[in-house]
Amino acid sequence: MYGLINQALKDMVCARAGQSVWSEVCSAVGISDDDFDELHPYPDKVTYSLVHETSKKLSVAVETMLRDFGHYWISFTAHHGYGDIMSLFGSDLRTCLKNLNRMHGHMGALMPQLKAPRFVVIENSDAQITVQYFSDRSGLAPFVVGLLTGLADKFEEAVV
């Protein structure tokens, strides 16, 4: 995964628990607690290990950790130079969700090794849609749930 996601995790952990907890997480994983190069790909194992160790340090289930992180990801990326890109792909939740694949395609130009997930949006009615998520990576569905709730908050819309 790209360093941007690892940097976002670091930012979230430091904001919630402090730099010392992040340093302990990194030590347990066997990596430096320095910043990550946002546009550099890192092995997926690094990100998974950071998430698992963070969940242990914070005494939170991995699924909860991933959901919270997915929600946090939306505000993190908006405040770190990617908010304008998100805005290009929709001014409301439904439009944004329909354009997630296009947004990831655009990001692929900046991150050529990006292994983006794929989303299918099914319009059940004017008031209801279903979002299907597909990825080569396993175990990230709670992260996606957090992303969806984060996007709903961004657009001030409710999701169930």
Image (cartoon, rainbow, N blue to C red):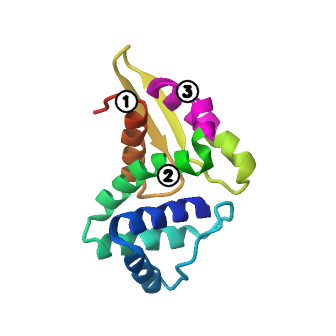
Residue 56, quarter of the rendered image: bottom left
Q: Considering the image in quadrants, where does the C terminus appear?
A: top left
Label 2: few (<14), some or many (≥20) within 10 Å? many
Which residue: 52% across, 30% down? 96
* Residue 87, horizontal then vertical, whole percent: 58, 32
Instruction: Estimate the spatial distance between the alpha carbons at disc 3 and disc 1, rounded to whole Å.
Output: 13 Å
Q: Considering the image in quadrants, where does the N terminus appear?
A: bottom right
Q: Do the residues labelled 1 and 2 touch (CB within 8 Å)?
A: no
| Residue type beneath disc 1 | Glu
Label 3: few (<14), some or many (≥20) within 10 Å? some
* Magenta stretch, overall SS: helix
The local secondary structure at tag 3 comes to loop
* Residue 104, horizontal then vertical, whole percent: 62, 42
Q: Which residue is disc 1 drawn over?
A: 156
Determine whether 67 is above or below 124 in the image.
Answer: below
In the image, residue 151 lies in the stretch drawn in magenta: no
| Residue type beneath disc 2 | Phe
N-terminal-most mark, 1 or 2: 2
Label 1: few (<14), some or many (≥20) within 10 Å? few
The local secondary structure at tag 2 comes to helix
Q: Give the range drawn in magenta.
A: 84-103
Q: Which residue is disc 2 drawn over?
A: 76
Instruction: Estimate the spatial distance between the alpha carbons at disc 1 and disc 2, rounded to whole Å.
Output: 17 Å
In the image, residue 98 lies in the stretch drawn in magenta: yes
Q: Which mark is residue 90?
A: 3
* Residue 7, horizontal then vertical, whole percent: 54, 64
* Residue 41, horizontal then vertical, whole percent: 66, 65
